[in-house]
Amino acid sequence: MKNMVYIQSGGPTSVINTSFYGAVREAQRHPDQIDHIYGSQNGIEGLIDDYLIDIGQEDDEQIELLLQTPGSILGTTRRKLPKDINDPIYGKIIENLKKHEIKYVFVNGGNDSMDTCYKLSLLVKQLGLDFVVIGVPKTIDNDLAATDHSLGFPSCAKFVVNTVNELIKDACCFKVGKVHIVEIMGRDAGWLTAAPDVLPEENRPHLFYLPENKFDLDQFLKDVKEVYAREGYAMVCISEGIQFPRDMSNVRVDGFGHAQLGGAASDLCRIVEDKLNLPTRAVELSLTQRACPAFISLVDREEAIKTGEIAVKSALEGVTGKMIVFKRVSQNPYKIEYELADLSKVANAVSLIPQSMMKDATRMDESYRQYIRPLINGEVTLKCKDGIALVSNFKRVRV
Amino acid sequence: MKNMVYIQSGGPTSVINTSFYGAVREAQRHPDQIDHIYGSQNGIEGLIDDYLIDIGQEDDEQIELLLQTPGSILGTTRRKLPKDINDPIYGKIIENLKKHEIKYVFVNGGNDSMDTCYKLSLLVKQLGLDFVVIGVPKTIDNDLAATDHSLGFPSCAKFVVNTVNELIKDACCFKVGKVHIVEIMGRDAGWLTAAPDVLPEENRPHLFYLPENKFDLDQFLKDVKEVYAREGYAMVCISEGIQFPRDMSNVRVDGFGHAQLGGAASDLCRIVEDKLNLPTRAVELSLTQRACPAFISLVDREEAIKTGEIAVKSALEGVTGKMIVFKRVSQNPYKIEYELADLSKVANAVSLIPQSMMKDATRMDESYRQYIRPLINGEVTLKCKDGIALVSNFKRVRV
């Protein structure tokens, strides 16, 4: 039993394949302890269906391109494991782990995926099996508990900040301005939506509406009207997760049981036009925000590689039932330490923006800006061919 | 009369401020012939309202940042000049040109703006005045006549190609795929929408729907169903301008009299869910596509600078009533020559994708790929601070 399997779970990020890269490179440095590096096809599904691919068969050049490849190279899933640990699904997972002589299991994901990871670790413990299970933090929403931030969030925030900066320049170049409403990802937490507040004051959005605060439609209309009257246009950032009365009859539900969000900006624009008679423009950043290689933050990349490495090192030391977390030990210069947190503390918990980081209901405090500023720092140079950023294409040799 | 005025018109592009940069730098090389460089605030409106700003008052560092500044630094407009050349508006324009001792007028814009430019040049000729009027081509839609391509299109296409590449990697990493419909700018012409067809075959979208072809909803549903059955997901690129039966009651109209488009992808997704019962995801690239500095194509940047320079040189030689156009004289290596075309041939004409560049109703021919490939080539390095691309902020000293 000297093999490892790596699982990517939940939505992709710009660096989801980068932490995988770090883990692969570290594992390759320990051929005495790890024979084969496997990837589980489509998250935990691969371990249920016995669909693993052999990373050892991939070309080194394709491994290197993981650093700038969007999407989840191994495939991902939003499937949630059953609560009952005696469910036959767990039997299948254990059977396949044994079959492939796997000792080390890595689960890279967000809140829901850490629940998968936690359940696996409990099962292993309960059955007295000799597997180790380690969590690698990932979520653009940045709502994982017990860590300063999550991998993927910094790059996504960098995309959002730079894109809103661009939209502001676009918005304010017309004589008759519009009410621009930008819809940014974030179901329960507004970390991403608030990010453009780090822009220099002269290019900063006017209003932010986060899921942390109760959304009051009348107050929203009052705010927008006031800004438009003063500035001649308005730049408003909203989280996709804000709640207001709207037709949700067409909304779909994903595998984790969450509604597929989107359309809030369009709906609010319609309300603004109706109630305030102002011209509007809705921009939903949608899937483009979560994995754009051009906006990978160098800090995010370096931390992702390091996290993958530490996950493997920890596993080799026998650590199990833990997720790698970041502790910020210095703000200026920015410095983090890598620690291990119990999965029980992470699974299904949610970290929201504290009220102390908000100036008021629609603006952020300087402490939020200090928090986010170092995270989005540093640019990467992409390998391109004919103007197109190269992506890794795996052979996917099934074992 | 030794001053010049520069006008930015219509929607911004990634390089709209770059051709302005080229013109400013060239003008600065001729202090004997050009005393003052003025910018017209909000397009032709500045000349009507007597609102000009003195570019000579701006810091050199801010001029340099024009190369990566989105939006139109001078402000823009969609106002169309009246047909009747005896309208008092023309009197105001001439009065202000005389007042500020302007000899050289540059209009940077697309089809509608070249109409403004053409009308101005006619008026000048008719009145026997000593102004020269030169057009600088710009439109992300790439539908300007008489030129191989238009400034801004290459960078926007580069954004679209790279973003769709990212979306494909995102789309195909789930076990149960979706029908992804990406809505791309383009009212009458599909140049931008078709751009992702240059992606390597394994990462290429499956279907393209362009305004050049009549959109048949039944055929669309048949196509989508077939691709989904074969691939397990579908990546579909549509132009915002495609026509199909939908509720347009909420649609707004801009200053040029065109409907503000958008929402076609959402509407089509709803139809796909209803008729085919497949999961969908609509992504509308919206305003983010047209001026993202991170995707400026080096070719576009270099051509924009050169075009601005040539516009000024031509004006100094007394050329008037012309727009700078590009003639592709070599494909490999890519090489263009700069020529001058009569504004009468450009104003309000539209260049569509020829049928010879389409393989069939939903895919492009290799000749289209050869056309677009060199245009999106070459990356730029942005000047950033704290992870944010710097933008030019003008003092805007009014004269």
Image (cartoon, coloured by chain):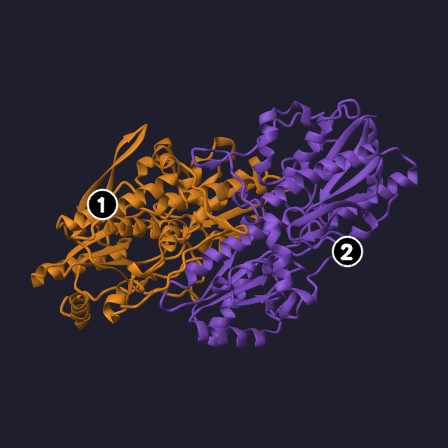
Chain colours: A purple, B orange
Q: Name the residue under label 2.
A: A349
Residue B299 appears at what percent x and percent y?
Answer: 35, 39
- Residue at horizontal 27%, vertical 30%? B330
* Subunit ID for the residue under disc 1: B
Q: Is B220 on the left-hand or right-hand side of A69?
A: left
Pointer 2: residues within 10 angstroms few (<14), some, or many (20+)?
A: some
Disc 1 marks which amino acid?
Ile
Front residue of this view, candidates A243 and B245: A243
Above-or-below relation of A206 to B141: below
User: Is residue A263 something one can see in this rendering?
Assistant: no
- Residue at horizontal 57%, vertical 30%? A393
Q: Mark 1 points at which residue?
A: B310
Residue B195 appears at what percent x and percent y?
Answer: 41, 41
Q: Is B46 on the left-hand or right-hand side of A313?
A: left
Disc 2 marks which amino acid?
Ala
Front residue of this view, candidates B316 and B172: B316
- Residue at horizontal 73%, vertical 46%? A337
- Which element carries disc 1, helix, strand or loop? helix
In the rendered view of the protein, which quadrant contains the C terminus of chain B? bottom left
Cα–Cα span, label 2 and label 1: 61 Å
User: Is residue B57 something one can see in this rendering?
Assistant: yes
* Subunit ID for the residue under disc 2: A
In the rendered view of the protein, which quadrant contains the N terminus of chain B? bottom left
Marks 2/1 same chain: no
Residue B225 appears at what percent x and percent y?
Answer: 53, 42
